[in-house]
């Protein structure tokens, strides 16, 4: 009514510009850190993996193309580390997934004390892996450790495993400790998944004459498909990245028996200053975890739902 | 009798499973706390018994003689500053992506989100080289720069919480004369407090326990954070368990105590972290 259309639009445009500026101003600090120290390193590591680099000065950079990858293919310690890592992933996937699902089904019955028990089972997930690693290496010390002392007390003194000192056993001991610390997270994801299943579905099944086991295997577990895939993908990524626990418990020993990809990458880079070769191992680690994350996003997208 | 028994039987099974697991989960932690009050000889000769006399001597030894107190304060400093920066960046970012429209929004959002798919194991080598060039090795500046760059998850979670804030309220605030920043700070942020709690807890656990980056970027023992100090104790106290266990107990107490007070928020924060992919 008052003024020409251009006059009306001018303040609105100014408002827009002001809002855009606010938006960029609020994003700027975050991006200022994110781009150089999180995003750039991804590009950098791909590049560095194509160089031979002893030490960290730019003059010692030497272009070698795919040589680091060729060397990796012939490095049996790399394959050993990869195999240890794969065993780690597979064992935790099988044991932790099935165990926490079973436990979630029990705790979902809501008997007296079930909420208390859940709360306790989650506690190890807030502890540091370094604390957990050192604590369990004391507990598992062959002579004076808790476990072997207990074995002696109950008359099994003839069984005194060396645990972390035994190259055939160490990896599985570390895996068991990892599960001790981590299962609470899977448990709670399953509990949340179970709570999302409506009572009506289960009541309907009961009316149709389904038995307890039938309900669990035919109805509940299939309905938990999405939760199960989240749990399994999370476990896969966590276990491929495992570093702290191994360093705190064994440092990769004895005789490389517990060396995993991250530990090999770290030692090659920072102890032997083979920066190019270490970077190539990091790239392998990156490709694996990135592929698994991408798979997760793809699964989520296919279901047309983004959680959180 | 029979139907009663049939109803009781599963309960017996549930309690058996839960109690066994309770012992497996709690006993190692309980043993750590209890043994830290013993003297080393007793930890080694009588690991299951109660302490002869409860003594805090190991705590004093760890805290003062071994300078664990210093590491503890260092960890508090790094965690508090790191958390502060992450919270500011994440709440601002989450708000912008949820509530403002501007050119390049979708691109920038996914561009930032990409960071969630990159583990710190991968960024560590280039970052070490960058900080080495910049002369920032052995300084908290480098460590904090890394922490301030790990905000993708926080932005992502805050965005979903800001979606739940009604846009009408923000419009009303603007009409009442709030500036764009005041609308965010005074109106939207208080309504998304729940999200801030979730990411604060997630990042607290991450920062307090972080090991790989401090291990790589810090050299001077005076700068040690708790996990680094514990690793050096592991070597010097290989045979002297009581102060080792005292240090482990002190390292665990803050997160464990927080957890028991804010259980619901912790579980929410940590499982949200699980869903980040």
Image (cartoon, coloured by chain):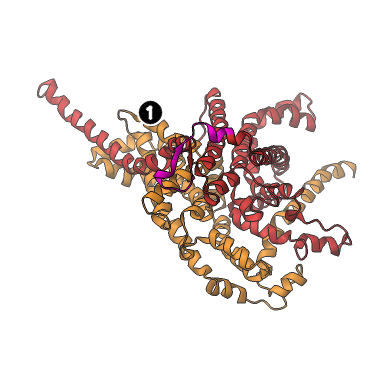
Chain colours: A red, B orange
Q: On screen, A230 above or below A275?
A: above
User: Is residue A165 in sight in this rendering?
Assistant: yes
Badge 1 element: helix
Q: Position of residue B143 (x, y in %)?
A: 43, 53
Q: On screen, A67 above or below B60?
A: above
Q: On screen, A296 above or below B31?
A: above
Q: Position of residue B196 (x, y in %)?
A: 44, 47
Q: Residues within 10 Å of mark 1 (few under 14, many from 20)?
A: few
Residue B233, quarter of picture: bottom right
Is A63 magenta? The answer is: yes
Q: Position of residue B158 (x, y in %)?
A: 43, 41
Residue under pointer 1: B106
Front one among B255 and B77: B77
Front one among A116 and B119: B119
User: Is residue B150 in sight in this rendering?
Assistant: no
Q: Position of residue B67 (x, y in %)?
A: 52, 70
**Residue located at (22% from left, 35% from top):** A18
Region of the chain picked out in magenta, as a range: A54-70
Front one among A68 and B115: A68
**Residue located at (13% from left, 22% from top):** A6
Numbered label tally: 1
Is B163 magenta? The answer is: no
Q: Quadrant of the N terminus of chain A?
A: top left
Horizontal placement of B40 versus A69: left or right?
A: right
**Residue located at (81% from left, 48% from top):** B12
């Amino acid at each position: 009514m008052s003024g020409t259309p251009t006059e009306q639009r001018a303040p609105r445009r100014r408002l827009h510009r002001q809002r855009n500026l606010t938006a960029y101003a609020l994003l700027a600090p975050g991006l200022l850190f994110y781009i150089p120290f999180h995003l750039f390193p991804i590009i950098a590591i791909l590049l560095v993996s194509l160089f031979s680099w002893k030490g960290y000065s730019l003059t010692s950079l030497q272009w070698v193309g795919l040589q680091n990858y060729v060397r990796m293919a012939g490095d049996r310690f790399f394959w050993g580390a990869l195999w240890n890592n794969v065993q780690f992933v597979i064992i935790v996937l099988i044991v932790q997934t099935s165990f926490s699902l079973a436990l979630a089904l029990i705790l979902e019955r809501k008997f007296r004390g079930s909420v208390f028990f859940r709360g306790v089972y989650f506690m190890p997930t807030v502890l540091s892996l370094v604390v957990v690693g050192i604590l369990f290496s004391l507990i598992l010390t062959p002579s004076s450790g808790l476990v072997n002392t207990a074995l002696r007390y109950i008359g099994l003194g003839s069984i005194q495993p060396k645990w972390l000192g035994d190259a055939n056993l160490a990896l599985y001991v570390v895996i068991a400790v990892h599960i001790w610390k981590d299962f609470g997270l899977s448990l709670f994801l399953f509990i949340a998944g179970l709570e999302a299943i409506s009572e009506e579905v289960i009541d309907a099944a009961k009316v149709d004459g389904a038995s307890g086991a039938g309900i669990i295997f035919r109805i509940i577990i299939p309905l938990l498909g999405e939760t199960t895939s989240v749990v399994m993908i999370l476990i896969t990524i966590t276990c491929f990245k495992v570093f702290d626990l191994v360093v705190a418990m064994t440092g990769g020993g004895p005789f490389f028996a517990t060396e995993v990809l991250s530990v090999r990458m770290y030692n090659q880079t920072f102890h032997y200053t083979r920066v190019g070769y270490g970077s190539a191992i990091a790239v392998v680690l990156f490709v694996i975890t990135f592929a698994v994350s991408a798979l997760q996003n793809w699964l989520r997208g296919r279901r047309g739902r983004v959680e959180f | 009798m029979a139907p009663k028994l049939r109803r009781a039987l599963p309960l017996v099974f549930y309690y058996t499973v839960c109690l066994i697991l309770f012992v497996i989960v709690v006993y190692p932690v309980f043993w750590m706390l209890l043994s830290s009050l013993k003297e080393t000889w007793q930890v080694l000769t009588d690991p299951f018994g109660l302490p002869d006399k409860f003594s805090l001597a190991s705590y004093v030894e760890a805290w003062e003689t071994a300078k664990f107190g210093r590491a503890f304060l260092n960890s508090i400093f790094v965690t508090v500053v790191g958390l502060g920066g992450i919270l500011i960046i994440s709440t601002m970012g989450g708000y912008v992506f949820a509530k403002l429209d501007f050119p390049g929004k979708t691109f920038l959002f996914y561009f930032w989100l990409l960071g969630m798919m990159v583990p710190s194991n991968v960024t560590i080598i280039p970052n070490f080289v960058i900080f080495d060039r910049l002369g920032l090795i052995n300084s908290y500046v480098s460590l904090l720069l890394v922490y301030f760059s790990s905000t993708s998850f926080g932005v992502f979670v805050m965005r979903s919480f800001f979606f739940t804030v009604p846009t009408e309220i923000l419009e009303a605030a603007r009409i009442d004369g709030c500036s764009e920043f005041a609308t965010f700070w005074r109106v939207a942020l208080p309504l998304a407090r729940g999200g801030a709690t979730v990411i604060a807890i997630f990042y607290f656990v991450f920062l307090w326990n972080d090991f790989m980056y401090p291990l790589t970027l810090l050299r001077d023992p005076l700068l040690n954070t708790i996990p680094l100090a514990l690793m050096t104790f592991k070597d010097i106290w290989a045979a002297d368990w009581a102060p080792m266990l005292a240090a482990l107990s002190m390292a665990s107490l803050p997160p464990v105590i927080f957890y028991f007070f804010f259980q619901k928020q912790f579980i929410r924060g940590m499982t949200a972290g699980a869903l980040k992919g």
